[in-house]
Image (cartoon, coloured by chain):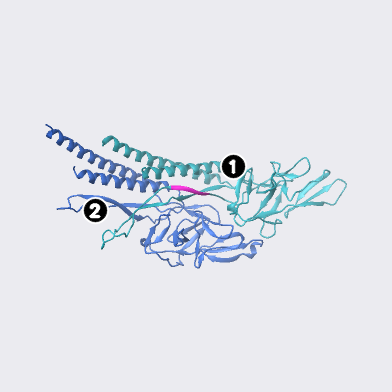
């Protein structure tokens, strides 16, 4: 079929996908620990209709060639792992990571997922769990008769129990980092999983080995920049309109042909 | 049969190809570092017995528009934009060195630095790799420094330098994969004067207004060719009517 039509059609497709990415970012402006996505555009392969420099006769060469591009596609969506702002809360199990690293979460199937969302709470057995009820790894269980609980910047969880004046350490939160954070697979519920391209997790104590520190009583907000997203949305809409104009123009040309010949 | 019919047909076909190039540019108005393609028509006389009475129009590349796009701030340390003239050297799928303006880079699990389209970025000595690290920083001259994995920010160390080149744009040609290569093959020399800015990306340089005007012009030219086919057909029919018994 007509290449002009198809090149413009790929443009519509790609802009449509970008709009989904922008809409998802905007929908997650209030999601704790959310990292914004960006669609990476790539031009599709070129068709070489006439090779430049090919022999036109034995003694002469074509001075110009003709290569026709075939459109565009979305090659990847990339997450922007820039730090989000920190929101002060009063929850004593709320924590945010300042710097690199992810909390480790044990999934119901026994695998480990990773998250920047530090809004933890306690379940009926005293386990520290995420909002979805998945326990943090290494597991931390809070005893029943606790009067106060605190989380240190290095992830030490200590409690003061009734009848005791000295705090006791009940657990240690550890963070994981990856060589290629872009390679982590987002799975929803604010969780990410390891993939072949992310590399294996490097686990360590917060504040050591380049890992970030923990701040208790605060949460990391989404890092979506709404102004950027709105500008992107305008650009996306206009590019979509231009591509649809290109389709209708090509259509008119073909229509003119069929009506007049 | 009137030979004029074929001249108009060739014209219409070539204009449709030019429209395809224009539509490809429009489709890539959001592609990072994309450079718009141009089309020029050349006349090709048809030689045969006697005089070359007819001249066909043939579409050909009018090269690539190398003007700069707009800088977009992304705040990602692995996004780089080339300031002014120059290109980032990458390795194409054919193993040869090629050049691009798209600087949205990433580091794979094995430490290879790639563009988001999957082409390895070159240093002076070969494909650029970084050791396992937590933070990668790219300096204005393309110097890559990292904080090795498991160490603090004080242990920052310099790794290598991205190969930045500035060959004459006249010598560059776009390949089937959209990368630019030297027309004669071979590698361009490293240019010390080319600088990059980290945390920014360069947009496509497709001029929306110009592309839309081009589109209208090509549409009207196309209609002109069709009109010409129609007139030739009308002439033929009139002749047949007169000759009819």
Judge if badges 1 and 2 mark residues of a common chain: no
Crowding near pointer 2: few (<14 within 10 Å), some, many (20+)? few
Q: Secondary structure at mark 1?
A: loop
Q: Is residue A185 left or right of residue A8?
A: right
- Mark 1 vs mark 2, foreground winner is 2
Q: Which chain is cyan?
A: A
User: Which residue is label 1 attached to?
Assistant: A28
Q: Is residue B16 left or right of residue A117?
A: left
Q: In the rendering, which numbered label is found on residue B204?
A: none
Q: Quadrant of residue A58?
A: bottom left
Magenta span of residues: A72-76
User: Which residue is label 2 attached to?
Assistant: B44
Q: Position of residue A164 (x, y in %)?
A: 87, 49
Whether pointer 1 and pointer 2 mark residues with C-beta atoms closer than 8 Å, the reply is no
What is the quadrant of the C terminus of chain B in the image?
Answer: top left
Residue that extends furthest to the top in the rendered view of this protein: B245
What is the quadrant of the N terminus of chain B in the image?
Answer: top left
Instruction: Tell me, yes or no, whether the highlighted magenta stretch contains residue A75.
Output: yes
The answer to whether A228 is drawn above or below residue A57 in the figure is above
Q: Colour of chain B?
A: blue
Q: Secondary structure at mark 2?
A: strand
Q: Is residue A32 left or right of residue A169?
A: left
Chain letter for mark 2, please.
B
Crowding near pointer 1: few (<14 within 10 Å), some, many (20+)? some
């Amino acid at each position: 079929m007509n290449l002009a039509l198809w090149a413009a059609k790929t443009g519509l497709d790609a802009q449509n996908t970008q709009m989904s990415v922008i809409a998802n970012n905007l929908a997650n402006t209030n999601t704790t620990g959310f990292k914004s996505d960006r669609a990476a555009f790539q031009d599709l392969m070129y068709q070489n209709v006439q090779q430049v420099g090919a022999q036109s006769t034995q003694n002469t060469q074509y001075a110009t060639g003709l290569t026709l591009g075939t459109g565009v596609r979305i090659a990847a969506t990339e997450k922007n792992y820039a730090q989000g702002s920190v929101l002060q809360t009063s929850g004593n199990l709320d924590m945010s990571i300042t710097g690199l690293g992810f909390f480790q979460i044990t999934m119901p199937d026994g695998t480990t997922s990773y998250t920047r969302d530090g809004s933890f709470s306690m379940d009926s057995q005293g386990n520290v769990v995420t909002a979805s009820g998945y326990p943090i790894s290494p597991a931390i269980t809070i005893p029943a008769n606790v009067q106060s609980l605190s989380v240190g910047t290095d992830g030490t969880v200590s409690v003061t129990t009734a009848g005791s004046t000295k705090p006791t350490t009940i657990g240690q939160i550890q963070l994981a980092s990856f060589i290629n954070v872009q390679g982590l697979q987002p799975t929803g519920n604010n969780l990410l999983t390891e993939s072949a391209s992310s590399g294996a997790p490097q686990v360590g104590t917060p504040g050591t080995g380049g890992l970030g520190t923990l701040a208790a009583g605060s949460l990391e907000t989404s890092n979506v920049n709404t102004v950027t997203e709105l500008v992107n949305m305008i650009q996306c809409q206009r590019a979509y309109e231009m591509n649809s104009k290109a389709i209708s123009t090509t259509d008119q040309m073909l229509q003119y042909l069929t009506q007049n010949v | 049969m009137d030979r004029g019919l074929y001249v108009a047909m060739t014209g219409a076909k070539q204009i449709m190809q030019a429209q395809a190039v224009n539509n490809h540019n429009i489709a890539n108005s959001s592609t990072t570092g994309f450079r718009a393609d141009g089309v020029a028509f050349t006349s090709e006389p048809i030689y045969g017995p006697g005089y070359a009475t007819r001249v066909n129009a043939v579409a050909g590349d009018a090269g690539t528009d190398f003007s700069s796009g707009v800088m977009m701030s992304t705040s990602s340390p692995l996004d780089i934009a080339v300031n002014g003239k120059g290109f980032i050297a990458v390795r194409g799928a054919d193993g040869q060195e090629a050049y691009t303006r798209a600087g949205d880079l990433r580091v794979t699990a094995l430490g290879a630095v790639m563009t988001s389209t999957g082409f390895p970025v070159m240093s002076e000595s070969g494909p650029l790799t970084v050791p396992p690290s937590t933070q990668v920083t790219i300096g204005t001259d393309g110097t890559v420094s990292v904080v090795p994995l498991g160490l603090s920010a004080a242990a920052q160390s310099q790794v290598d330098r991205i190969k930045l080149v500035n060959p004459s744009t006249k010598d560059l040609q776009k390949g089937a994969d959209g990368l630019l290569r030297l027309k004669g093959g071979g590698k361009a020399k490293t240019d010390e004067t080319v600088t990059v800015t980290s945390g920014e990306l360069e947009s496509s340089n497709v001029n929306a207004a110009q592309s839309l005007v081009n589109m209208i012009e090509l549409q009207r030219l196309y209609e002109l060719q069709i009109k010409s086919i129609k007139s030739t057909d009308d002439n033929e029919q009139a002749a047949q009517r007169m000759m009819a018994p």
